Image: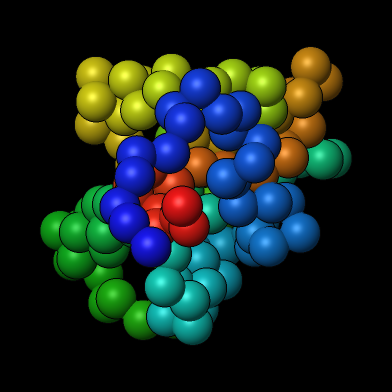
Amino acid sequence: MKNTIMNNLTPVSTIMKSFTDLITVSPEDTLATVKEIFNEHRFHHVPVLNKHKLVGIISKTDFYKACLDIVSAGSTLDNATLAAIHVKEYMTEKLAKIAPTERVDVAALIFKENIFHCIPIVNKDNELLGVITPFDILTHSFKLTKD
Protein backbone atom coordinates (compact mmCIF):
# COMPACT_ATOMS: atom_id res chain seq x y z
CA MET A 1 0.00 0.00 0.00
CA LYS A 2 1.17 3.51 -0.65
CA ASN A 3 0.01 6.99 0.21
CA THR A 4 -1.82 8.61 -2.65
CA ILE A 5 -3.87 11.74 -2.75
CA MET A 6 -7.44 10.79 -3.57
CA ASN A 7 -9.44 12.53 -6.27
CA ASN A 8 -10.68 15.85 -4.86
CA LEU A 9 -13.12 16.18 -7.75
CA THR A 10 -15.22 13.53 -6.02
CA PRO A 11 -18.77 14.63 -5.07
CA VAL A 12 -19.15 15.47 -1.38
CA SER A 13 -22.02 12.97 -1.18
CA THR A 14 -19.47 10.14 -1.29
CA ILE A 15 -17.62 11.30 1.86
CA MET A 16 -20.23 13.22 3.87
CA LYS A 17 -21.75 11.99 7.11
CA SER A 18 -25.20 10.90 6.04
CA PHE A 19 -28.40 12.27 7.58
CA THR A 20 -29.04 8.85 9.11
CA ASP A 21 -25.78 9.20 11.09
CA LEU A 22 -26.60 12.68 12.43
CA ILE A 23 -28.36 13.88 15.52
CA THR A 24 -30.50 16.95 14.94
CA VAL A 25 -32.54 19.32 17.08
CA SER A 26 -35.41 21.70 16.44
CA PRO A 27 -35.37 25.44 17.12
CA GLU A 28 -37.70 24.76 20.08
CA ASP A 29 -35.38 22.25 21.74
CA THR A 30 -33.44 23.58 24.70
CA LEU A 31 -29.79 24.12 25.48
CA ALA A 32 -30.10 21.34 28.08
CA THR A 33 -30.73 18.94 25.18
CA VAL A 34 -27.75 20.36 23.29
CA LYS A 35 -25.53 19.97 26.36
CA GLU A 36 -26.54 16.32 26.63
CA ILE A 37 -25.79 15.72 22.94
CA PHE A 38 -22.35 17.34 23.17
CA ASN A 39 -21.56 15.40 26.37
CA GLU A 40 -22.51 12.05 24.81
CA HIS A 41 -20.97 12.47 21.36
CA ARG A 42 -17.67 13.61 19.90
CA PHE A 43 -19.00 16.05 17.33
CA HIS A 44 -19.09 19.83 17.55
CA HIS A 45 -22.13 20.80 15.45
CA VAL A 46 -25.79 19.88 15.61
CA PRO A 47 -28.02 20.73 12.63
CA VAL A 48 -31.27 22.49 13.50
CA LEU A 49 -34.30 21.35 11.52
CA ASN A 50 -37.83 22.69 11.29
CA LYS A 51 -40.18 20.28 9.50
CA HIS A 52 -37.26 18.52 7.77
CA LYS A 53 -35.83 21.84 6.52
CA LEU A 54 -32.41 23.07 7.64
CA VAL A 55 -32.83 26.34 9.55
CA GLY A 56 -29.49 26.54 11.36
CA ILE A 57 -26.67 24.87 13.23
CA ILE A 58 -25.80 25.06 16.88
CA SER A 59 -22.10 24.55 17.47
CA LYS A 60 -20.13 24.06 20.65
CA THR A 61 -18.99 27.66 20.19
CA ASP A 62 -22.64 28.81 20.11
CA PHE A 63 -23.34 26.72 23.21
CA TYR A 64 -20.32 28.14 25.08
CA LYS A 65 -21.41 31.67 24.14
CA ALA A 66 -24.81 30.93 25.68
CA CYS A 67 -23.11 29.63 28.84
CA LEU A 68 -20.97 32.76 29.04
CA ASP A 69 -24.08 34.95 28.60
CA ILE A 70 -25.84 33.06 31.40
CA VAL A 71 -22.93 33.46 33.82
CA SER A 72 -22.36 37.10 32.79
CA ALA A 73 -26.01 37.85 33.56
CA GLY A 74 -25.47 36.52 37.08
CA SER A 75 -27.54 33.37 36.60
CA THR A 76 -26.58 29.90 37.70
CA LEU A 77 -25.30 27.66 34.92
CA ASP A 78 -27.36 24.54 35.60
CA ASN A 79 -29.73 22.26 33.71
CA ALA A 80 -32.79 24.23 34.84
CA THR A 81 -31.37 27.42 33.34
CA LEU A 82 -30.29 25.63 30.15
CA ALA A 83 -33.75 24.05 29.89
CA ALA A 84 -35.31 27.52 29.81
CA ILE A 85 -33.35 28.63 26.73
CA HIS A 86 -34.31 27.51 23.24
CA VAL A 87 -31.86 26.51 20.52
CA LYS A 88 -33.25 29.24 18.24
CA GLU A 89 -31.82 31.89 20.57
CA TYR A 90 -28.22 30.82 19.93
CA MET A 91 -28.15 28.83 16.70
CA THR A 92 -26.31 30.15 13.66
CA GLU A 93 -28.83 30.81 10.90
CA LYS A 94 -26.67 32.13 8.07
CA LEU A 95 -24.97 29.02 6.73
CA ALA A 96 -22.89 27.99 3.80
CA LYS A 97 -24.70 25.02 2.29
CA ILE A 98 -23.79 22.91 -0.70
CA ALA A 99 -25.47 20.34 -2.91
CA PRO A 100 -24.50 16.67 -2.72
CA THR A 101 -23.06 16.90 -6.23
CA GLU A 102 -20.60 19.64 -5.27
CA ARG A 103 -16.96 18.58 -5.42
CA VAL A 104 -14.72 17.95 -2.41
CA ASP A 105 -12.26 20.62 -3.60
CA VAL A 106 -15.03 23.24 -3.52
CA ALA A 107 -15.91 22.27 0.06
CA ALA A 108 -12.21 22.51 0.96
CA LEU A 109 -12.06 26.05 -0.43
CA ILE A 110 -15.14 27.05 1.56
CA PHE A 111 -13.48 25.81 4.76
CA LYS A 112 -10.24 27.56 3.87
CA GLU A 113 -11.97 30.92 3.30
CA ASN A 114 -14.26 30.83 6.35
CA ILE A 115 -14.05 30.24 10.09
CA PHE A 116 -16.64 27.48 10.43
CA HIS A 117 -15.96 23.78 10.56
CA CYS A 118 -19.08 22.11 9.20
CA ILE A 119 -20.95 22.48 5.92
CA PRO A 120 -24.48 21.09 5.61
CA ILE A 121 -25.29 19.17 2.44
CA VAL A 122 -28.86 19.92 1.31
CA ASN A 123 -31.13 19.13 -1.61
CA LYS A 124 -32.97 21.71 -3.71
CA ASP A 125 -35.74 21.86 -1.08
CA ASN A 126 -33.23 22.72 1.71
CA GLU A 127 -33.69 19.31 3.30
CA LEU A 128 -30.61 18.08 5.14
CA LEU A 129 -28.87 15.13 3.48
CA GLY A 130 -25.68 15.17 5.54
CA VAL A 131 -22.71 17.26 6.66
CA ILE A 132 -19.06 17.49 5.75
CA THR A 133 -16.19 18.64 7.97
CA PRO A 134 -12.53 19.40 7.30
CA PHE A 135 -11.71 16.08 8.99
CA ASP A 136 -13.83 14.26 6.37
CA ILE A 137 -11.85 15.97 3.61
CA LEU A 138 -8.50 15.14 5.24
CA THR A 139 -9.54 11.53 5.70
CA HIS A 140 -10.63 11.36 2.06
CA SER A 141 -7.53 13.07 0.73
CA PHE A 142 -5.01 10.88 2.51
CA LYS A 143 -6.58 7.44 2.37
CA LEU A 144 -4.19 4.59 1.76
CA THR A 145 -4.98 2.83 -1.47
CA LYS A 146 -3.76 -0.40 -2.97
CA ASP A 147 -1.65 -0.30 -6.13
Picture quadrant of residue 107: top left
- Expressed as whole percent of the image width and height from the top left, the position of residue 98 reads 58, 22
**Residue at point 48% right, 57% down?**
146
**Residue at point 51% right, 22% down?**
9
- Locate residue 73 relative to residue 77 in the image: left or right: left
Quadrant the N terminus occupies: bottom left
Looking at the image, can residue 113 be seen? yes
**Residue at point 36% right, 21% down?**
110
- Locate residue 115 relative to residue 2 in the image: left or right: left
In the depicted view, which residue is nearer to us: 13 or 3? 3
- Expressed as whole percent of the image width and height from the top left, the position of residue 7 reads 47, 31
- Expressed as whole percent of the image width and height from the top left, the position of residue 101 reads 67, 22
For the view shown, which residue lies furthest in the front direction? 147
In the depicted view, which residue is nearer to us: 122 or 138? 138
Reply above or below: 57 against 10: below
- Locate residue 49 relative to residue 80 in the image: left or right: right
In the depicted view, which residue is nearer to us: 28 or 92? 92
Looking at the image, can residue 26 be seen? no
- Expressed as whole percent of the image width and height from the top left, the position of residue 142 reads 34, 49
